[in-house]
Image (tube, rainbow, N blue to C red):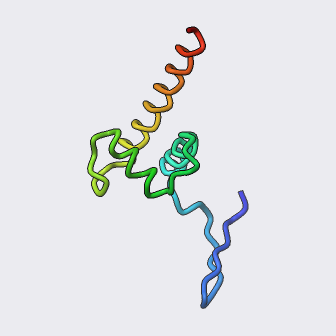
Amino acid sequence: DAPLVAQTNRRTVVEKSPRLPLRHNNLHRQLANLGYPHWRFGQLVANVAGWEDADLWDVEDAQMLAAARAHLEAVAQREEERQRA
């Protein structure tokens, strides 16, 4: 993989890997898949934390990922049931 280049006021910094660990990339991908483009990012995070009954400031990545996956599964199940009716 090509290194990432970040511009700063003083110098160019070359990084060998992305800043966010893989678990964050998975979380971001799941959040993007939720299908609420009209929600701001902070609103999306707050709502997903609420689905887990977690305090916004204390919610863990794993809780957010689990909530997003559970929500996607529930939406898919409702859609499947709707199509059968």
Q: Quadrant of the rendered structure where residue 9 is? A: bottom right
Q: Is residue 35 above or below residue 40?
A: above
Residue placed at 58% from the left, 49% from the top?
37
Residue 85, given in percent of the width and then of the height, sits at 56, 9
Number of numbered callouts drawn:
0
Left-right relation of 58 to 8: left
Q: Which quadrant holds the N terminus? A: bottom right
Q: Residue at x 57, y 41 (%)?
A: 35
27 vs 9, left or right, is left
* The residue positioned farthest toward the top in the image shown: 85
Horizontal side of 55 relative to 21 (left or right) equals: left
Residue shown at 50% from the left, 27% from the top: 75
Relative depth, front residue between 74 and 23: 74
Q: Which residue occupies the foreground of this view, 19 or 3?
A: 19
Q: Could you say which is closer to the camera, residue 33 or residue 19?
A: 33
Residue at the spot x=40%, y=44% of the render?
Answer: 48
The x, y position of residue 13, in whole percent, is 62, 78
Seen in the picture, residue 7 relative to 63 is either above or below; the reply is: below
